[in-house]
Amino acid sequence: MKIVLASRNQKKIGELRTLLAETLPDVEVLSLDDVGIFGEIEENGATFEENALIKARAAASSGYIGVGDDSGLTVDALGGEPGVYSARFAFLKTGMNDHDDQANNRTVLDLLQDVPTERRGAAFVSAIACVFPDGRSFTVRGEVKGRILTEHHGNGGFGYDPLFYYEPYGKTLAEVTSSEKNAVSHRGKAIRAFAERLKAEI
């Protein structure tokens, strides 16, 4: 069986292949390029699930099962922002530094400048959508809760990881090993839930 992941990112594709191999060894994961779908997919959904479905529908236009994902950071004191704009948050707020991790981190820190520790709760969220050629679809979600520190800690990971303090580990997600991160990450949880749901649907 073949599924198409709405991505050209080989790391994402490899990650999905590895995880699905444990649950569904007969599944072949293809990229958009593999099936001749070129151009950008416009993500204009209001939620992670909506954006994941937009991508999955585009991938399903190949005639195979389509899979899409969307993820980001939600901060309680910011009313859920950056949310679906996580990758472009600095640009959204300042008009500069599009898709710049350091600028995004600075923007979050600036907005939380006067917010006390107990009100700095946050979550990383990942949604994965699946669309079948017959039109059936489902979405799954993974979350990891933590809080935003007042400064960067650690050099690993990417995005908001250096600000995201995970209480059970006593450090940020930029300070943990990749295996520690994958064990608790929003993306890892969502992929595992997706694999189980797909197995039940086919």
Image (spheres, rainbow, N blue to C red):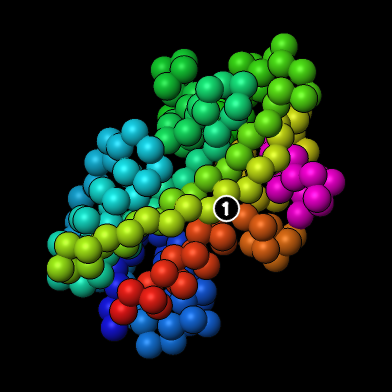
Judging depth in this view, the residue of 131 and 114 nearest the camera is 131
Choose top left, top right, bottom left or bottom right for residue 1: bottom left
Image quadrant containing the C terminus: bottom left
The structure residue drawn at horizontal position 64% and vertical position 34%, both measured from the top left corner, is 122
Q: Residue at x 47, y 46 (%)?
A: 71
Q: Look at mark 1 in the image and give the residue it sits on.
A: 186
Mark 1, other Cα within 10 Å: few <14 / some 14–19 / many ≥20 = many
Q: Which residues are magenta?
A: 162-176
For label 1, the SS is helix
Q: Horizontal and vertical percent for residue 48? A: 40, 43
Residue visible at 80% across and 50% down?
Answer: 168
Q: Is residue 45 above or below residue 62?
A: above
Q: Nearer the viewer, residue 119 or 105?
A: 119
Task: Give residue 104's position: percent from left, percent from top.
Answer: 55, 29
- How many marks the image carries: the answer is 1
Residue 192, position in %: x, y?
52, 67
- Residue 175 placed where, x, y %? 77, 49
Q: Quadrant of residue 130?
A: bottom left
Residue 147 in view (yes/no):
yes
Residue positioned most to the right: 170
| Relative horizontal placement of residue 20, taking residue 176 as reference (left or right) | left
- Under mark 1, the amino acid is His
Based on the picture, tell me whether residue 166 belongs to the magenta stretch. Answer: yes
Above-or-below relation of 115 to 3: above
* Residue 99 can be seen in this image: no
